[in-house]
Image (cartoon, coloured by chain):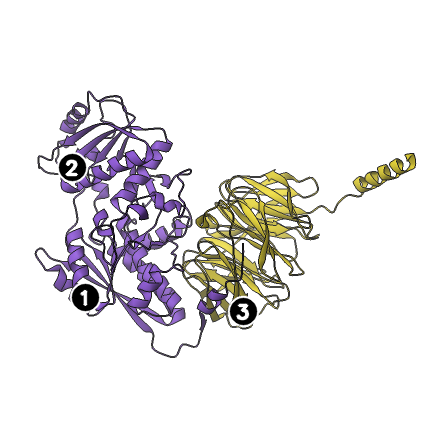
Amino acid sequence: MVRWLVGAIGLSIVVSHALAADPVEIGIGYLGHTGVKSKLSLVEQPSENDGIAGARLAIEDNNTTGKFLNQRFTLEEVRLKEGEDVANAAMALAGRNSFIIADLPADALLRAADALRDRGTVVLNAGSIDDRLREQDCRANVVHIAPTRSMLADALAQYLVWKQWKRWMLVVGSHDQDKLYAEVLRRAAKRFGAKIVQERVFEDTGGARRTDSGVTQIQRQMPVFTQQAPAYDVLIAADESEVFASYLPYRTWDPRPVAGSAGLVPTSWDAAQDQWGATQLQNRFIKMNSRRMTALDMQAWTAVRMIGEASSRTNSGDPKLVLDFLKGSNFSIAAFKGQRLTLRDWNQQLRQPILLVDGRMVVSVSPQDGFLHQVSELDTLGVDRPETKCRLN
Amino acid sequence: MRGRCLLSGMAVWLAAATPALAFIAYVSNEKSNTVSVIDTDKWTVTRTIKVGQRPRGIEFTRNGKFVLVAVGDDDKIEVIDVATQQVVDSLPSGPDPELFTQDAAGKILYVANENDNTVTVIDLEKRVRVGDIQVGVEPEGMAISPDGKILINTSETTNMAHFIDTATRQIVANVLVDARPRFAEFKRDSSELWVSSEIGGTVSVIDPAKRIITGKISFSIPGLRREAIQPVGIGITKDGKTAFIALGPANRIAVVDATSHTVTKYLLVGQRVWHMAFTPDEKYLLVTNGVSNDVSVIDVSAQKVIKTIQVGELPWGITMAQP
């Protein structure tokens, strides 16, 4: 039932327009690596400012709010060069900023987080989807905005099961992260009642991503690679390394849809997302950056907005107060996904719906109807509290 | 015995012969790019008017002669002539107008422009833009105080209700509310301002004089998860005693005792309920159901849904003609 939230009244902040004092400066660092991963599709090739562009937009959004609250947010970008020590770079950045948005691989992220442990700097993981960062390698000073690999796999699996495409043929790349993706896809199949009828490995034999006469060979290779499969409904490709998945649609031996790393792809964000007021965000982003918004941009935007939201609610830029607020039950963030996003208190992972996209349209959004949960349906995606290996502190 | 039958029969005949006051409601259909006209005597759609792209905010002008409808994707507000039921003009609103409000005299229109963090001020007689007010990120909800001195705008990503002095067009106060504030409504006696937070899942009750939150209304419906309860439209009766709050994808209208701020009942309506309008006699409340493409009619005193009327695709806003 409804009741007066007397407690909330104390929390409500009223802001007078007379703001004579200097604004409170809230510094946010952005720590990423140089160079971008090469994609098979030219249209998916990320720009140099992938990620940071989203952070910049959120800084602008935070400052629009901040001018009413006498808070000013700043952003400092640091890109690690090849061989540069991530711990030193993180320490230097933390000297000037209380928060660090990280777009780093898991090992580098852990080194940065451990170096900053006693400083009180809050690290917001915008880039890494590795489950282990939220499980056995979780850290109390790291908040995760990027979804986990298992959340992505579960989101896809729920839709395929809803669609009654329950017989999967799984094709796995030969690199480590491809194998990690395959692992969570197997887990998802088991959780939601799909069956992997066969697995194949696509070996990376090296070579250039793009060649002038590439298509001729691919058109012969892909049907052959996928022939003589047992009866299946959908081919699922685990190819985070961008070696083969995008070559599969329309080229499989049997006429079957493709999902996973190509075809129907689970993601935190897409340039086609226009529901729940998202058009305004997409327009602001395009106006500022002259390109469309990617998942990494959105993850960085959300990270900076979470700092802004917590700073406005606590009326403070103190990292400890902000982190406590983010972890508390009063925190939620609106991020154009149709519902409030909150943190899982056991591992500081942001709960979020996952979009299923085909490169042109948003096909569906998981969790799917009917996948129930006693706490939050968003917790049907990814590793849940009873299974977690995370022990914070 | 026979006489009584005859008498009650006559009473029925009399009731049928005295026509109920018919009112006209205009409903904006976000997806069909049309406005449905509903006759509240017959409870049917009597006309469908073609308008610009993505019609949402819709309101009668104060003199009752025109209906204004914000067509967001065409970056303007169209003017429907009530007599001919056709679009006769448009107003320069600024980019992507969604909701708007008028001053008491019906001379000034204030429009929330989601795309550029401004509230646009339009002179309704001259039909020109006379000013802009910078507000928070994604301005949306608009309301004007009964004395006309304060304009309220809510900004969805900044999460504030901005208090704007209509004389100076300056922001004089900001009240932080829960996430994604979408709609603002004053009680007629100015004692309270209500602001709904769609993502936060609450309605903040604000003291307009002190400009502080004095209470929050929250909702809980057995079997529905918290995330699905997303308050949007608010309707408060003229006497300030009863309020109705649309709960979006919860598919329900909450009936609230507006004095004690407690929910007394949840009424099941159509899917994704957005906005609402009372008939001028306050006998009925009409609410738009975005996903199920219909309008539910609520009997206000009985607090019951009595009818559903099919309209266009994704109905969003609704406004009612005064008698």
Residue B305 x %, y %: 63, 43
Image colour assigned to chain B: yellow
Q: Is residue A188 above or below residue B240?
A: above
* Residue A130 visible in the displayed image: no
Q: Chain of mark 1?
A: A
Q: Nearer the viewer, mark 2 or mark 3?
A: 2
Q: What residue is shown at x 55% (from left), y 69% (from top)?
A: B208
Q: Are marks 2 and 1 in contact (CB under 8 Å)?
A: no
Disc 3 and disc 1: Cα gap in Å? 45 Å
Q: Residue furthest top?
A: A228
Residue A93, label in figure = 1
Q: Are marks 3 and 1 in contact (CB under 8 Å)?
A: no
Secondary element at tag 1: helix
Q: Amino acid at mark 3?
A: Thr
> Can residue B178 be seen by looking at this rendering?
yes
Q: Chain of mark 3?
A: B
Q: Residues within 10 Å of mark 3 (few under 14, many from 20)?
A: some
Q: Quadrant of residue B156?
A: bottom left
The answer to whether residue B259 is above or below residue A161 is below
Q: Is residue B268 left or right of residue A238?
A: right
Residue that mark 3 sits on: B166
* Among the 4 quarters of the image, the one containing residue A332: bottom left
Q: CA distance from mark 2 to mark 3?
A: 61 Å
Q: Earlier in the sequence, mark 2 or mark 1?
A: 1
Q: Is residue A370 left or right of residue B211?
A: left
- Between circles 3 and 1, the one closer to the viewer is 1
Q: Nearest the camera: B173 or A226?
A: A226
